Image: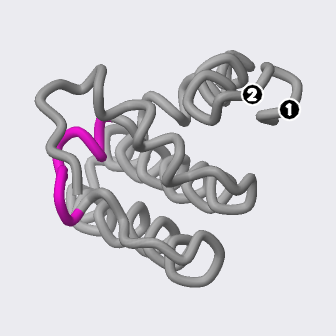
């Protein structure tokens, strides 16, 4: 396995490990739940909701890697960069800007990568 020395090197690898749209969709659900739980905790003052954040995020991600992508989650080797990449991928997807990064990581044109 290659050792990544920076997030910029890791990012294309991360996207290749999430090559299937259904895998990414599971991640989007999990990351959205994490954000919703954080906001709910802030708004309601029910701080125990923060305890559910890792479960919500990782459950969807790990199930998608096992059942759809059939690979080992990057979290096990690069936990901090993987978490950062989850949020980057989610944000780029939300803002409609993920296509070019997917294309570059997969060696395709922007339209093919979607």
Q: Is residue 79 magenta?
A: yes
Q: Which residue is mark 2?
A: 108
Q: Quadrant of residue 100?
A: top right
Q: Are marks 1 and 2 in contact (CB under 8 Å)?
A: yes
Q: Is residue 100 left or right of residue 61?
A: right
Q: Is residue 80 left or right of residue 94?
A: left
Q: Residues within 10 Å of mark 2 (few under 14, many from 20)?
A: some
Residue closest to the eye, 39 or 105: 105
- Seen in the picture, residue 94 relative to 53 is either above or below; the reply is above
Q: Secondary structure at mark 1?
A: helix
Q: Residue furthest right?
A: 111
Q: Is residue 108 left or right of residue 50?
A: right
Residue 112 image label = 1
Q: Is residue 34 magenta?
A: no
Q: Is residue 112 left or right of residue 41?
A: right
- Seen in the picture, residue 23 relative to 41 is either above or below; the reply is below
Residue 67 image label = none
Magenta span covers which residues? 76-84
The kind of secondary structure the magenta stretch mainly shows is helix
């Amino acid at each position: 396995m290659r050792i990544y020395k920076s997030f910029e090197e890791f990012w294309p690898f991360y996207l290749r490990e999430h090559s299937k749209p259904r895998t990414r969709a599971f991640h989007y659900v999990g990351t959205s739940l994490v954000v919703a739980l954080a906001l709910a905790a802030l708004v309601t003052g029910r701080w125990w909701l923060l305890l559910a954040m890792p479960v919500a995020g990782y459950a969807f991600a790990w199930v998608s890697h096992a059942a759809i992508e059939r690979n080992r989650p990057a979290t096990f080797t690069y936990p901090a960069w993987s978490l950062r990449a989850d949020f980057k991928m989610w944000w780029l997807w939300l803002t409609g800007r993920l296509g070019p990064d997917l294309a570059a990581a997969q060696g395709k044109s922007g339209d093919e990568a979607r």
